[in-house]
Each structure stands twice: as structure tokens, then as C-alpha cells.
Amino acid sequence: MHQELLLCGFVVIFMAAFTRAAVAKIVNGENADIEDCPWQISLQKYKDGEWKHVCGGSIIDERWILTATHCFNTSLTARNYRIAAGSSFLSRMTVYRSVKQIFVHEFFESPLEYDNDIMLLELWTPLSFGSTINKITLDKSKSNIFVGDICKVSGWGRVNVTKGSISHLDRLQQANLSVVTNENCALSYPGVNFDNSKICLQKNGTDVCFGDSGGPMVCEANDGINKLVGITSFGPDECDGSKPGGYTKVSFFLDWIKNKMKMNIERKYCKKYRKYQKNKKNRKYKKNKKNRRYTKN
């Protein structure tokens, strides 16, 4: 079940309560430069008087960020979230943007099934693009990624999950992982439906981890262009690559993404048009009132 509410100008989709023990740093990755992945952002949540990194995300337009639904806490609103961009280091971020609206997928019912784990964020203020902040092209093909292909993942998640020794790095991490079959993935996650809306990656000893969720899975297309193929969604708690990790397949949700963005543009246009018509009516009324002539009976 889900419910859409418009509250103080913020559209947030509230659904049946869902939680995840932690949000999926890359274990055994390598340092990354933001210039090599300028679409990478840090999704941050305001809690207990400070902003904390909770998930990754990808810039797909000046005002739009693509990330994962399970990163959103339904007890909060858009006011509690912001994005940080423009640096490889969390402590040196140069650009922050408040989140205006949050669009989670209407049919994301449970984090246990990982279906429709996709979310759009609209920003109050557009981003200015340059060498450290830029958008990534969405993959539009449903079949051009093959088993064995190498794709890059990145994030500021945990780099160590040893009991009693959980650590994070301030520096953005990245790793190259291989595409594996969904059938292989299904063996590790009984009960999860591995249809065309998901894609899986694996590399023994290396994996995304808690804090990387919502971040980009980027593959180089035949034309040499980096494209956003997946969104980090779920994986084993060990973060050691012993099992494949699951990613939301972007091409499967292209229509959903376009419709949400278009719907919002149309809503803004209608609002401006209504305001224009109202002002036009007021101007006409004032003009008529000024030109009105009264006769004495």
C-alpha cells in the first residue's frame, strides 16, 4: 500500500513501513577521483543536529538525482535530506543542495524483495556543471550488457565490516566488478524475483558495502560513453564478494523516470499558467474599474 501526500510544497510517497538494518563503503576498492565520476553525490540526512552520509546517488540532470528507495526513511520528509557534490572527500564538499521533492517507486513494498528499488530526488536549486559535477547518461538498452562485462561501482560506504572494527574512509572509493547471471544471483537470495528489473555483479574479495546503496553502477558502452546501468541495491552483509550483489536496472525504469520528471515539469507549467491567468484577470478588472463611468439618476 502507498499514499501520496502534498505537504507544504513537498511531495513524498509514504508506503507501508520498511526498514533496512544499514544502507549499502566499498571493501577492497581503490581511491577514486571525482573528475572520473563527477555524477557521484553523497545523499545526507539531518539527524541529531548534524548531517550524515547515508547513501550514494547519481546526477542525471541539473535538478535531478537518481538513487535507491530503501535509502529513504518514511518517518522523515524532504526537509531532512540534502545532497553534497564536487569533491572526492566527504569533508571537502563544495556544493550542497536541499531536496525539494522525493519520488519513491509506487510499488516498492518491502526491502526483503528488493523490487522497484529506485528513487528520484528533485533539488531546489539546479547544479552548475563542470569538471567535478556533471550528469551521467542513462543506459537505454535492455540487452547490451553481457555476462563477464566489467562495470564500475563507487561510493563512500564502509571499507571494513570486521566485527568490532567497522571503518569508513573520507575518500571516495571505486571498484571494477563483473556482470554475472541472474540465475547465479538467485541461488544466493532465495525468494527474490530476478527479472529484467535487476542486474548482478560479483568479484571475489571486493564488493560494495553499507553506505554505498543508491550509488552508480557504470558500464562503458560500445561507443565508449560511460552509462548508468544500475543503482546499488542489495548484497551480502559480509561485503566480501563471496556472493553477487544486486543492482536496480536503470533501462527497465526509463519510462518511470521520464514520467516523474515530465509530470513535475507539467505541474510547474500549470501553476505558472494559473498564476498568469489570475494576474491577467486582475489587470483587466483594474482597467475596467478605472475606465468605468457613473451617471447620476
Image (spheres, rainbow, N blue to C red):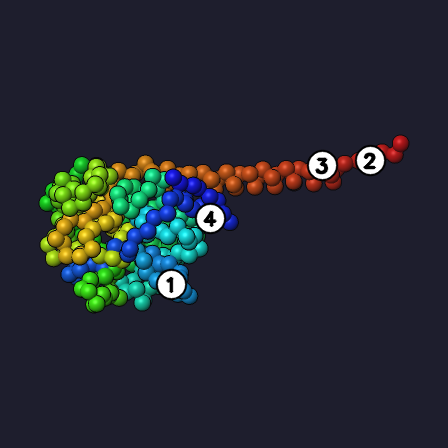
For mark 1, does the 10 Å Cα neighbourhood hold few (<14), some (14 to 19), or many (20 or more) residues? some
Residue 41 or residue 213, whichever sits in front: 213
Q: Position of residue 71 (x, y in %)?
A: 32, 52
Tell me how far mark 1 sits from mark 3, CA to CA.
55 Å
Tell me how far mark 3 sits from mark 2, CA to CA.
12 Å
Residue that badge 1 annotates: 51
Tell me how far mark 3 sits from mark 4, CA to CA.
39 Å
Tell me how far mark 1 sits from mark 2, CA to CA.
65 Å
Q: Earlier in the sequence, mark 4 or mark 2?
A: 4
Residue found at x 30% / y 52%: 20
Residue found at x 49% / y 47%: 7
Q: Does residue 61 appear to the left or right of 291 in the view shown?
A: left
Tell me how far mark 4 sits from mark 1, CA to CA.
20 Å
Quarter of the figure with residue 186: top left
Residue that badge 2 annotates: 294
Q: Is residue 175 visible?
A: no
Q: Does residue 227 appear to the left or right of 82 in the view shown?
A: left
- Residue, far top: 297
Quarter of the figure with residue 250: top left
Can you say whether 255 is above or below 246 in the image?
above
For mark 3, does the 10 Å Cα neighbourhood hold few (<14), some (14 to 19), or many (20 or more) residues? few
* Amino acid type at mark 3: Asn
Q: Which mark's residue is nearer the viewer, 3 or 4? A: 4
Residue that badge 3 annotates: 288
* Amino acid type at mark 4: Phe
For mark 2, does the 10 Å Cα neighbourhood hold few (<14), some (14 to 19), or many (20 or more) residues? few
Residue that badge 4 annotates: 10
